[in-house]
Image (spheres, helix red, strand yellow):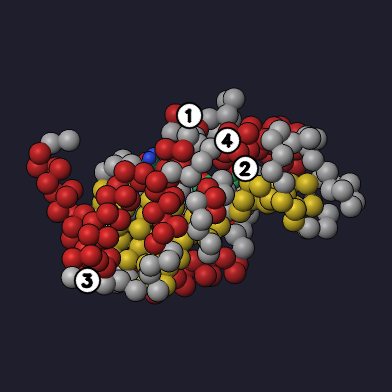
């Protein structure tokens, strides 16, 4: 990294830590990128393909209706990968921040459950969770961590109907209580971090715009620019597992300095 860029990044981290130190209401939106350093494929990265299918092709009600076995093979494959992975330093910083900011909301598009595994408690899972299955008939939700699944497609032990992943597929609406709470904390936060998302999928990608319109500072962490970059007050070109600890260390330093 060029000397000048390193300096500006360091200056940005220091400036951000000062603002963060005085913040009461902080919101964070995460995407697949925060789990990349844990070894989980992102959606739009080159390893985002399964066989020849793109996520948008398989993560739909019509794909499941047409071929539940194929769709379940895909989720079983992802559960197999995710089940063997651990949260990284990025997840852990966010779990710590939940306990230091009076109002902290963690909003994720990820269904991998790694925020929970890192110790985060109040997580708004916009798109559901890959470790929960739902009965198509009765709607009952069960937790299942079997990898691989004992039966594909899995069936409800009560009524023997098909079970589906308790996730939100393209063309399906999000849980109204979850999306309402997400927009509420976005419109009331003082700072919103946008970490590891290509900011393409709606309505998630609108949350930072809501925060920006409400006057919040927007902080992006992503190796690549996104459609949101031009709305950001800080945009760090780097990996979440490296940038978040840098910001957190500076925040700790800031707090210790001010305590003296
Ligand atoms: C809905 C669960 C009402 C399933 C998922 C308006 C305009 C256009 C389209 C629409 C619109 N409104 C609705 C739509 C349709 C659609 C949509 O947005 N389509 C997109 C493709 C244009 N939205 C919906 O269907 C939503 N429902 O709106 O209902 C409705 C219904 C019908 C019609 C109208 C309205 C439901 C969307 C939820 C779908 N389910 N997941 C599953 O996972 O199996 S979405 C899924 O894909 C993820 O959850 C996530 O949201 C998305 C992937 O995006 P990212 O997480 O950002 O990942 P990506 O790979 O793209 O990017 C990773 C980023 O990380 C990159 O930028 C990379 O540079 C960066 N990165 C890499 N390494 C690191 C890193 N960053 C930091 N550190 C690193 N180390």
In the rendered structure, find residue 47 and report the number of the disc placed on it: 1
Closer to viewer: mark 3 or mark 1: 3
Outermost residue, right side? 159
Which badge, 4 or 1, is on the more N-terminal residue?
Answer: 1
Which badge, 2 or 1, is on the more N-terminal residue?
Answer: 1
- Mark 2 CB lies closer than 8 A to ligand 1: yes
Separation (CA) of disc 3 from disc 2: 50 Å
Is disc 1 placed on a helix, strand or loop?
helix
**Count of labels in the image:** 4
**How busy is the neighbourhood of tag 1: few (under 14 within 10 Å), some, or many (20 plus)?**
few
- Placement of 24 over or under 81, stated as above or below: below
Left or right, 229 with reference to 206: left
Left or right, 64 with reference to 249: right
In the rendered structure, find residue 59 and report the number of the disc placed on it: 2
**Percent position of residue 231, x then y:** 28, 58
**Percent position of residue 36, x then y:** 44, 38
Give the residue number, with chain letter if any, for mark 3.
259
Give the residue number, with chain letter if any, for mark 4.
84
Separation (CA) of disc 3 from disc 1: 46 Å
Closer to viewer: mark 3 or mark 4: 3
Closer to viewer: mark 3 or mark 2: 3
């Amino acid at each position: 990294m060029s000397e000048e860029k390193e300096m500006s990044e360091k200056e940005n981290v220091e400036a951000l830590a000062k603002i963060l130190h005085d913040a009461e209401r902080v919101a964070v939106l995460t995407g697949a990128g925060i789990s990349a350093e844990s070894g989980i494929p992102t959606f739009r990265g080159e390893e985002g393909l399964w066989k020849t299918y793109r996520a948008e092709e398989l993560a739909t009600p019509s794909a499941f209706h047409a071929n539940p076995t194929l769709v379940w093979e895909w989720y079983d494959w992802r559960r197999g990968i995710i089940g063997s992975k651990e949260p990284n330093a990025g997840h852990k910083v966010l779990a710590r921040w939940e306990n230091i900011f009076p109002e902290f909301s963690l909003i994720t598009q990820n269904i991998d459950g790694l925020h929970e595994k890192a110790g985060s408690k109040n997580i708004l899972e916009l798109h559901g969770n890959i470790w929960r299955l739902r009965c198509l008939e009765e709607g009952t939700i069960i937790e299942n961590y079997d990898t691989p699944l004992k039966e594909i497609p899995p069936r409800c032990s009560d009524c023997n109907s098909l079970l589906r992943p308790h996730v939100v597929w393209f063309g399906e609406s999000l849980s109204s209580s979850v999306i309402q709470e997400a927009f509420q904390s976005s419109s009331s936060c003082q700072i919103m971090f946008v970490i590891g998302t290509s900011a393409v999928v709606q309505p998630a990608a609108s949350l930072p715009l809501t925060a920006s319109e409400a006057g919040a500072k927007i902080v992006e962490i992503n190796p690549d620019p996104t459609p949101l970059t031009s709305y950001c007050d800080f945009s760090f070109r780097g990996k979440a597992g490296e940038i978040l600890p840098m910001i957190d260390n500076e925040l700790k330093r800031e707090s210790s300095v001010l305590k003296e």
